Image (spheres, rainbow, N blue to C red):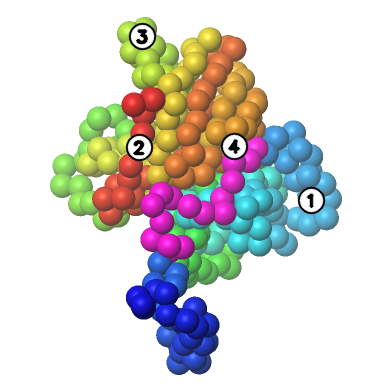
């Protein structure tokens, strides 16, 4: 008789597992299939947030709490499969922030890195590390790790932007620190446009010493990014999976603009139908221009301007567009690439 067929062996095993629990031990063979999976597996699910609904709820919140009281008036876009975790994917956070006319979101800093993708603004501003920049629709703005930052609205209309942070990553490493400045706004020590002038013209001050893995440019204006996409479309070099997809880079080394979050902007022409694609980096997409359709496994997600869609890791997707469409996206790809974990699967091969 083999050990596998021994009478009472299953019951004995269960007794053994229970006996070692008080000693903070667990049998690897009893859980291995759940922790070392053949393919990526999580509770993260595909989901779409409609901008009109998010915007309406934020305006409702603005009647209940000021930006100063809240410190950040933000509605978290929480993945339904990860309820209670404040996560949009297993490694990333997503929210939409609102600042009303005349308000300031007070200055603070934290070890979490943040991106802002501007959804609605005609003169709102953010200040990062002593420099102020105006926020316009489609701009990609970076708040590096441990940089002082505050936001304000000098216009007559509310402003809205998407916040993407690496909160779950910092939480995983148990490395979170945060503090407030004690003032609504930080002192402005550099003129507007200083970082773009120093680092955004394919030039750099002689003797510049790289102090951080984050790009020294903190505002990538949409007008310039969109112009680049339009120039490149002239060559009709459409990627079968992505259309024309460009990544935001750090001009110091050509790497990703942020060390923990990879950001991209892609253009897909009218009538585009992509080849299937899946990758290990769960991705958040934001509609910028036009309308499109994402097919993910057996689900169809129609998106429009400013809508937010999350696609989990290793979920095959295809894009379809009835008109020219632009998407902004972010994921944890830089981390995965550095650790040798990133994989992608293109087409039907």
Q: Is residue 323 left or right of residue 223?
A: right
Q: Position of residue 315 (x, y in %)?
A: 49, 39
- Front position among marks 2 and 4: 2
On the image, which quarter does residue 331 sit in?
top left
Can you identify the residue that label 2 sits on?
344
Magenta stretch in the rendered image: 33-48
- Front position among marks 2 and 3: 2
- The reply to whether the C-beta atoms of the residues labelled 4 and 3 are less than 8 Å apart is no
Nearest the eye: 280 or 178:
280
Can you identify the residue that label 4 sits on?
309
Q: Earlier in the sequence, mark 1 or mark 2?
A: 1
Spatial distance from mark 4 to mark 1, Cα to Cα? 22 Å
- 255 versus 346 height, above or below: below
**Helix, strand or loop at disc 4?**
strand
Nearest the eye: 89 or 216:
89
Identified at 70% across, 35% down, the residue is 50
Q: Using the rendered image of the protein, determine whether residue 268 is visible from the camera's viewpoint.
A: yes
Identified at 36% across, 29% down, the residue is 346
Q: Earlier in the sequence, mark 4 or mark 1?
A: 1
- The reply to whether the C-beta atoms of the residues labelled 1 and 3 are less than 8 Å apart is no
Spatial distance from mark 2 to mark 4, Cα to Cα? 19 Å
Classify mark 4: residues with Cα within 10 Å, few (<14), some (14-19) or many (20+): many
Nearest the eye: 64 or 262:
262
- Front position among marks 4 and 1: 4
Can you identify the residue that label 1 sits on?
61
**Which numbered circle lies on residue 236?**
3
Q: Earlier in the sequence, mark 1 or mark 3?
A: 1
Identified at 48% across, 66% down, the residue is 171
**Image quarter hosting the C terminus:** top left
């Amino acid at each position: 008789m083999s050990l596998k067929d021994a009478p009472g062996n299953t019951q004995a095993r269960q007794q053994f597992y229970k006996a070692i629990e008080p000693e903070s031990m667990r049998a690897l063979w009893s859980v291995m299939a759940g922790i070392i999976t053949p393919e990526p597996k999580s509770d993260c699910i595909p989901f779409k947030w409609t901008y009109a609904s998010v915007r309406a709820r934020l305006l409702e919140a603005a009647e209940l709490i000021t930006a100063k009281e809240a410190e950040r008036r933000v509605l978290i876009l929480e993945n339904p499969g990860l309820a209670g975790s404040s996560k949009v994917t297993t490694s990333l956070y997503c929210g939409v922030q609102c600042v009303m006319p005349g308000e300031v979101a007070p200055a603070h800093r934290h070890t979490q890195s943040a991106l802002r993708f501007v959804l609605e603004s005609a003169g709102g501003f953010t200040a990062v590390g002593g420099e102020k920049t105006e926020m316009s629709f489609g701009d990609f703005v970076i708040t590096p790790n441990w940089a002082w930052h505050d936001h304000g609205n000098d216009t007559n209309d509310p402003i809205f932007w998407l916040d993407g942070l690496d909160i779950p990553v910092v939480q995983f490493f148990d490395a979170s620190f945060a503090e407030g400045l004690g003032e609504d706004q930080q002192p402005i020590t550099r003129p507007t446009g200083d970082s773009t002038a120093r680092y955004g013209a394919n030039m750099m001050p002689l003797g510049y010493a790289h102090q951080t893995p984050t790009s020294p440019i903190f505002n990538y204006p949409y007008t310039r990014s969109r112009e680049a996409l339009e120039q490149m479309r002239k060559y009709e070099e459409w990627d079968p999976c992505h259309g024309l997809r460009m990544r935001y880079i750090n001009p110091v080394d050509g790497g990703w603009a942020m060390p923990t979050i990879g950001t991209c902007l892609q253009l897909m022409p009218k009538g585009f139908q992509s080849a299937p694609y899946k990758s290990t980096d769960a991705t958040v997409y934001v509609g910028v221009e036009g309308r499109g359709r994402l097919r993910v496994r057996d689900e169809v997600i129609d998106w429009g301007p400013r809508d937010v869609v999350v696609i989990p890791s290793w979920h095959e997707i295809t894009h379809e567009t009835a008109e020219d469409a632009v998407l902004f996206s972010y994921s944890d790809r830089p981390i995965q690439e550095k650790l040798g974990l990133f994989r992608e699967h293109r087409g039907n091969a």
